[in-house]
Image: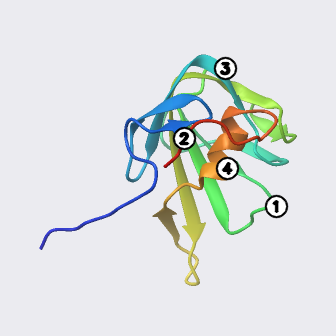
Amino acid sequence: MPIQQNWELQPGKQIAGYRVASGLGDISIEVKGEPVYAPFDGLLQPNDIEGCYVYTSPDVPAYLFRLCGLERPRVGDVQQGQPMGRAQFLSFATLRRQPDGKWTMVEPASDVLNRILNPNGMTMGNAG
């Protein structure tokens, strides 16, 4: 049976002025060495996947964000708008805690990605 998933963020679209390189699951964005910012006050921690980090925030407790490709990451507490590192390509995934406590990958929200790519959190580019 074919599975069809139609997410807003597809390859070739723009988010905060950067091109989405791949979509569906992890979203890969060509950041070209630019900084990646904390979307909320939170905590950046190493993940069990080498080169990946998990970002959590009490502002969105049902979600965690996985960021892969960060160069010289700022591990620990970060304030909203503070750089968390830089990336050539940022692979980004959003996971939501389910009622049974397991984490499930969900489509990343364009407004969260705008905050990560733009320290002012202003919507830039065309996500749709």
Q: Position of residue 53 (x, y in %)?
A: 60, 40
**Does 25 sit above or below residue 4?**
above
Of all residues, the one furthest to the top in this rendering is 33
Secondary element at image label 1:
loop
Q: Which amino acid type is shown beneath numbered disc 2? A: Asn
**SS at badge 3:** loop
| Other-residue count near label 1 (Cα within 10 Å), few / some / many at <14 / 14–19 / ≥20 | few
Read off the residue under disc 4: 112
The answer to which of marks 4 and 3 sits earlier in the sequence is 3
| Residue pictured at 44% horizontal, 39% vertical | 13
Label located before the other in sequence (1 or 2): 1
Answer few, some or many: residues within 10 Å of disc 2's Cα (few below 14, many 20 plus, some between 14 and 19): some
Q: Is residue 37 left or right of residue 87?
A: right
**Coordinates of residue 127 in the picture (x, y in percent):** 53, 45
- Give me the residue at 82% from left, 61% from top: 58
* Label disc, if present, on residue 59 of the rendered structure: 1
Question: Between 114 and 54, which is closer to the camera in this rendering?
Answer: 114
